[in-house]
Image (cartoon, rainbow, N blue to C red):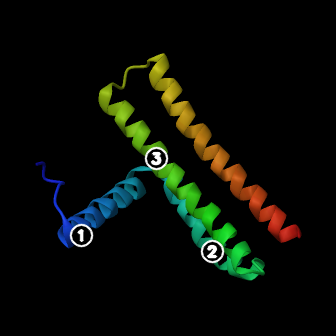
Amino acid sequence: MGTRSGKGLGRLYRAFGWSMSGLKATYVHEAAFRQELLLCIILTPCAFYFGKTGLEKSLLLGCLLLILIVELLNSAIEAAVDRISEDEHPLSGRAKDMGSAAVFLSLVNAGVIWLLIILS
């Protein structure tokens, strides 16, 4: 088995370490992730202020977390495409554009949720 296999708590500990490495790499190498993280840090206290119920608070916080998740996946797509080749290719461009579109839609989703809750 590979170095990432295993069972029990040891595997969970290693998986946590890999996750932290991924977050650190994304933070260091991706300006968009840093900007979105700052947005989430600023808006998190606002979610507790504007959310009247537990459901509203969870929606406000969940859509912020979704932005970061989608940005992580987009960054992973970009890194994998660039690893294969940095030459321009229609499929590479399409993959990167699709990842960017996913981030855009997560931002639109968050905006709609925040507006609906704040204006209600």
Which numbered disc flags the more N-terminal residue, 3 or 2?
2
Left or right of 70 on screen, residue 115: right
> What residue would you read off at disc 1?
13
Q: Amino acid at mark 3?
A: Leu
Which numbered disc flags the more N-terminal residue, 2 or 1?
1
> What residue would you read off at disc 3?
73
> What residue would you read off at disc 2?
44
Q: Amino acid at mark 2?
A: Thr
Left or right of 109 on screen, residue 76: left
Left or right of 27 on screen, residue 110: right
C-alpha distance separating marks 3 and 1: 22 Å
Position of residue 90 measured from the top left corner of the image (x, y, whole percent): 49, 17
Q: Residue at x 56, y 33 (%)?
A: 98
Q: To which quarter of the image does residue 36 belong?
A: bottom right
Which numbered disc flags the more N-terminal residue, 3 or 1?
1
| Mark 2 secondary-structure assignment | helix
| Mark 3 secondary-structure assignment | helix
Looking at the figure, which quarter contains the C terminus?
bottom right
Left or right of 105 on screen, residue 69: left
Q: Residue at x 50, y 59 (%)?
A: 34
Q: Residue furthest left?
A: 1
C-alpha distance separating marks 2 and 1: 28 Å
Figure disc tally: 3
